[in-house]
Image (cartoon, helix red, strand yellow):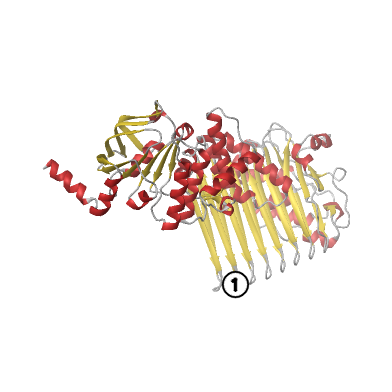
Amino acid sequence: MTVSTKKDHQLVELFLSTQANLDKSGLLIELKSAAKSSLDETGFPTLKEEEYKFTNINKRILDKIKKYASPNTVNNIGDVLEANQLFNSLEGYKLIRNNGVFEAELSSKSDGSFIVKPFSDLNSDEVKEIGSIETINKDPFTALNSYSFESGIRVEIPEGAILEQPILLVDVISADANGECVHPRAYFHAGKNSQATVIEITIFLDESPVFLNEVQEWNIESNAHIRHYKLQDGHKAELGVSNTSSNLARDATFTSVLLSLNGEMLRNNLSININDTNCTGNMYGIYMLNGKTHVDNHTNVDHKMPHSESNELYKGILTDQSRGVFNGKIFVRKDAQKTNAFQQNNNILLSEEAILNTKPQLEIWADDVKCSHGCTTGQLDEEALFYLRARGIGKESAKSLLLYAFAGEVLDKITHETFKKYCEEIVHERLGAIK
Amino acid sequence: MLSIKNLHAAIEGSPILNGINLEIKAGEVHAIMGPNGSGKSTLASVLAGREEYEVTEGSVTFKNKNILELSPEDRAREGIFLAFQYPVEIPGVSSTNFLRTAVNQVREYRGQSPLDAVKFLSLMKEKMKLVEIDQKLLSRALNEGFSGGEKKKNEIFQMAMLEPTLSILDETDSGLDIDALKVVANGVNQLKTKDNATIVVTHYQRLLDYIVPDFVHVLYKGKIVKSGTKDLALELEAKGYDWIKDELSGATV
């Protein structure tokens, strides 16, 4: 049993006291009250807890955030979106959230291949889905989100729908200078034989301290294929926790590509539950950190059934006093024979003060499986650098060529051309600035 | 063109080169031979500017410039080319992109305008023929998964693209079968003009049947202990390096 320290409970009380009656519809009251008791009981993780031992995010929240109620929404958000280069370059089904609140007017309307509903419109079956994949006891921040979210969305990609254009999930965030919290929440249901790409981006209107605590659930039916791309390129006062969970039915694929390029402290929890046979779970990530940015990626793939595979590749480039954490858990249950599970984490540290903690965690109970994992942490390859320089390429360009090649392996996993090009450009630009 | 005077160099405090003197003029081919550990590759590395080596004494001037003060990239831009003994595999960097960056940075240094994509590609096609390198290889990442022979051919191909005035071939022949050796040597010979020079560092006389040197130098314990014409290489081949070692120890006793 964990005994909550006074400090860690202080934050629980701050949240619970300020956000009593948020569920205006009352539909999700059961989830919210269960989340409240769970949070009250467990408190927030301290450094003593294995899962959060490198990432003391609750302390940062206490230090930096003064307002625990959700912030007001932003006026004239349409103008904001219009001014955003990335948003304008992307075409697709738009899902706009304004400080966590769904903006139906600015978002795309439902059609035959895309149905969006705010939580207030859910029917009783749909209500039960919320919190069924990312359960409140999985992570205290999931409990916090479940208690605190103001308006969530449920997105349905109907059976057989093949979305030619991506779904753009766009968060516009603006906080008070004292620091505020936003708890975005979404549930996606991908019907049988459907196929879609989701691109998730966040637009920050200011650099005020903000705590973004997102939960996203994915129910992926048989033979549905989902690609999920997320770009974290905020500012140096952004604190963030994201909990993303997906359930895969037979023959389904879920591919996640996460780019973490900025922030103060970010923690990303990604879970893929392989609940049936012939599924594919892909987890790819790149974290390119500078200043004092701290990014912690925890991934978990749970192979429950045979003949499925998972592929994981996370790469880090760390400079200045930045810190990276990678923890990759692969769980292969007794019944999950013939599983292929591969995991790789490679890091380049460009400064003396950058820190990286990496931990593969394999738990294999089946006896006929192929699993591999590997991690490397090192400096830029001096031999390769000299080779390029000996051909007349200047030191800075040689470095950036090598780093870009390193990052490129993950960027190549993005199949949406416009988004990929944008990501390549910002990665290039960032690498050019590394001395 | 190149003037090496009393060159001493060390790595991590242990001396490897102990007073090298060498003069190379335009149009000449010099072979540097010697037993393992005599300092051949160190000499090549020091000339190219590998930073692990510390020059403790002496001077190296190239076209009347003190190159010891120049970075490796500036030496390359001045016209020094090192064909690596072990070319590095660089995953993720495409051969074409790498070469175009190199060629254009060298051109920029020399005050020439950059080559556009079309001109670059036609230059590439022209030079590829020299070393019979397969175009498919160049669409791959730099040296990645190349065989030993392909890597060495790629070195000579890069040399052709960069048009150096001084080429240093560091054991380019090691590990090559005779067919690959002929291709590599043929490429080097075609690139030879009256204005450029070549240093061939080799362990075996065999290469010198195909790249005929004007001078042969024997390096031993970090010094040039004997210089001669290509006949010296044949003598070495016949008698082995012990002959030189014996002669030297005989002289000092």
Report the quarter where the N terminus of chain B lies.
Answer: top left
> What's the residue at 64%, 37% (across, down)?
B116
Report the quarter where the C terminus of chain B lies.
Answer: top left
Q: Nearer the viewer, residue A122 or A156?
A: A156
x and y percentages locating residue A86 in the rendered image: 74, 40
Q: Is residue A82 visible?
A: yes
Q: Callout 1, which amino acid?
A: Lys
Q: Is residue A52 left or right of residue B7?
A: right
x and y percentages locating residue A425 in the rendered image: 66, 40
Q: Is residue B82 left or right of residue A1?
A: left
x and y percentages locating residue B144 in the rendered image: 52, 53
Q: Is residue A135 visible?
A: no
Q: Nearer the viewer, residue A211 or B19?
A: B19
Label total for image:
1
- Picture quadrant where residue A382 is located: top left
Q: Is residue A79 above or below residue A334?
A: above
> What's the residue at 77%, 56% (across, down)?
A196
View extreme (top): residue: B64
View extreme (left): residue: B253
- Disc 1 chain ID: A
At numbered mark 1, what does the secondary structure look like: helix, strand or loop? loop
Q: Nearer the viewer, residue A417 or B229?
A: B229
Please give the residue where the numbered disc 1 appears in the rendered image. Answer: A338
Q: Nearer the viewer, residue A262 or B202?
A: B202
> What's the residue at 67%, 43% (across, down)?
A423
x and y percentages locating residue B77 in the rendered image: 49, 33
- Picture quadrant where residue A89 is located: top right
Mark 1 is surrounded, within 10 Å at the Cα level, by few (under 14), some (14 to 19) or many (20 or more) other residues, namely: many
